[in-house]
Amino acid sequence: MFRRLTFRLIFIIIICIVFLQSLLILLSTFLFNYNPSVLDHHSIINKDHNECVIDDKQAISALNRIQTLNCRRKLIDTFCNIKFQSLWPSRLQNECPENYDGNKLLTCLEFRSEFLDHFVDKKSNKILRIDPEQQFNHNDCTDLCMQIDFTFALFISNQYCICTHNYDSIIDRTNSLTNHTECDLQRAIHSKYSSNFLFIISTGVKKIIRKLPPLITTDNYGQNFTRPKIVFLLLLSGRSTLQVNRLMLNIFNYHHYYLIHVDAHDNYLFAELEYLQRKYPANIRLTQQRFNTIWGGSSLLTAILFCIHEALNKWNDWNFILNLSESSFPIKKIEQLEQYLAKNYERNFIKSHGKNTFDFIQTQALNKVFVQCERRMWRLTDRSLIKGIVWDGGSDWMILSRSFSNYVTEKLNDESSLVYGLRSYFEYSLLPAESFFHIVLRNTAYCTTIIANNLLATNWNRKRGCKCQQKKIVDWCGCSPNVFRLYGSTNSRGDISRLMATETRPLFFGRKFSPLIDKQIIDFVELRFLGQNNNLDKNHGFYLENIYHSRFDSLSYLPLFRRKFFTFFARQLLTSLCSDTYSNQTEIEIIETDLLFHNSNDFYGTVIRFQESIHRFQIDILLRTFSNQTILFDSSSGPKLKSIKICNSFDEKDEYFHNFDCLLDQTNRLEIWHEWQTFFGVYHICFVFIDPFNRIANKNQIILNNTKIIDNERIGLLYRHDYPLMNGLWKLIILDESTDAILGITQFFILSDDDHHINDMIIQSNYSYDQSITSIMIKYPEFFPNNSYHLSTINKIWYINQHCFHLSNNDNQHLCKNFQIYHHNYCDQIDWNIDKLKALYSF
């Protein structure tokens, strides 16, 4: 009886489990089908596009991630318009007289042997296998080979399309082929390709060999040549006011013009540069119409075309226009550039991709539809390339002649023109500026004016520069060059040799340069290549970059946890100077905050300017971190830890944290960059996280192996930690699991993102202390204070290094009765003063 009951019970349990699983499946299906975002999509479609069904996975993915209704409507409108009508022409006419003479069928053969393996060189040709279900004929093959810049197309029945430059080789091998005959052309064209027909077709494209004119090495910059007038188009974003001023200092000349476009998002930078237009009204102009020039955005092409049009309207005597960014910097004197361009009037300087055009089209996603919205590029669907033209692309840094610039702007309004058709296509493209001008030049009468170099030295390291770091702003993977560095990570010569190699080549600008990462190499370039000593003559070693200004940024731009952090130290200063006057009720207004960097390329500290509400004094404080936040220990048998840093927003390409001051709150994902001395073998390391109550909150095993070698002396690894963290002072212990040896300890602080000192999360620790951890806590008690969750424990990491006062119209020079402000207390007496540094970099 008991056994029967047991079996019956088991049977009932199984039935219940199956029933519950069925319910879960039904519930998940219901939730999926009634997803609010999907319902929103269908409601828009039914209203505006009755017959449009969005069935493309790419579009569905974008619509499920998009945030605003306006952008959702824009994506749906674009998708449905493309589906029911053409937003761009399907074919354009190649207008290049020198490099294109029309396609024509050269020969047609019928054979029975296997042609492909017999005599096609797969290395020098592009071979495409044709889908039998696809409607594809010899004309389609010709169009394709023309698009990807091949001179001949070979179409084999309905099997292969082969693009090649080697016509003579193909003919020689064809003549050696047995069992082949001349085919009847009409029968071959109209047959269903049951036989092996070979079409050899000239695409009309002529192979071009372009040579770069040599550098003129004379130092005689006299009037023995007609100086060209150049429009320097500065396409700027960010907040790097000082670096832009430094760039202008090295390229400004009254003979030339300077057109500045600042991203529509960057009001601070725009306001800081307005003085340039007031000071040099004849030479410098800031465009009042501004665009959202995000990386890869379609609006970047719009901005460039707008600026070219504005340059043509503003000045009528220039010869060339070249574009630069805040990360560009001259590596030769402007007089040398003038001399070089004077020998190449009416030429256009562009740098092509230097790879197979077919592969370039795939990597650039030129056959995809993108829409820019919410400061992001959304991928919608696939599309066919425009036929009848040669596709090209490469760098979007270029030097264009005035005549070509005028041609492009005029043709933009001619709906029958190639320029207009291409502009329509690239309105929905990723990285449009990297192809638009290349294709226009290749397919118009200006095809003979191309010099295949943009006179720019770019610091490419594709192994590190192509890590999809733009995924946050674009539905694609892209590449970006690295920042030039004076020294490598191990005090090697860095990129000096690469820069020195440009001296004898016609390269006049370099990118990228960033004073946030390496200011010293900019000093080096000024001194070595430009014969300038601008920075050194000023006898200062600081660089400053703003991160917040109350005049230009909303309150939400400065996160609450940062505002609380800065206010805490402002009150701390006032209390230390005037304990009897200032209380927690005193209002503190954060006016601006800036990052301060030292000449040694190190982050030096954060400068906060605030105003107190009693006497309304403006005060600057310099916050710095203590240098003893990390202790590293030697290991006799295990790996040696060289450095460790806990922060977020790590840039794997240039190996630095965008969050320079490393202020962290509870919503941040921790990123830990740790470097080790090179070793052989595999090691198991443990990261032990100690919470503000000195409990072990988490343990994570890290496997070290020498496949991550960065250079001959170090191995660098990035570890991301998603574990939820309470606010307060945290500790990280790095442990060698094989020996239990402590390799290092470090501290970091998590700030609260609300008004509470500690969140409601209670960590239940399931870990016991190892003997090594216990001993390290006893040996270094200053690292492990008890109950260190309050904001006041931030003083174990940060401290007020200096402070100063701004001159005031107020006759009262007493902050309080205990503290009088003297001359030496004023900010104009200190080196790191914000206004002084701005003045030093202006011109």
Image (tube, grey):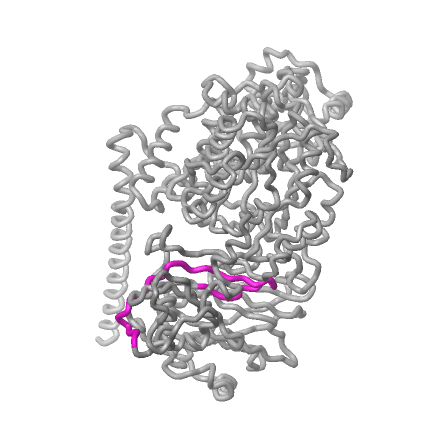
Of residues 147 and 110, the one nearer the viewer is 147
Residue 797 in the image: state x and y as whole percent. Answer: 46, 74
Residue 47: which quarter of the image?
top left
Q: Of residues 608 and 688, which is closer to you in this image? A: 608
Residue 109 shows up from this direction: yes
* Residue appearing at x 32%, y 33% in the figure: 53
Q: Percent x, y for residue 610?
A: 37, 63
Residue drawn at x 50%, y 51% is: 240
Residue numbers of the magenta segment: 581-607
Give the quadrant of residue 787. Answer: bottom left
Closest to the observer, 96 or 356 = 96
361 vs 2: above or below: above
Image quarter in which the N terminus is found: bottom left
Residue depicted at x 43% and y 71%:
822
| Residue 432 appears left or right of 487 | left
Residue 149 percent coordinates (x, y): 63, 27
Give the image location of residue 312, x and y in percent: 52, 27
Of 593 and 431, nearer the camera is: 593
* 593 in magenta: yes
Whether residue 726 is visible to the viewer of this picture, yes or no, is: no
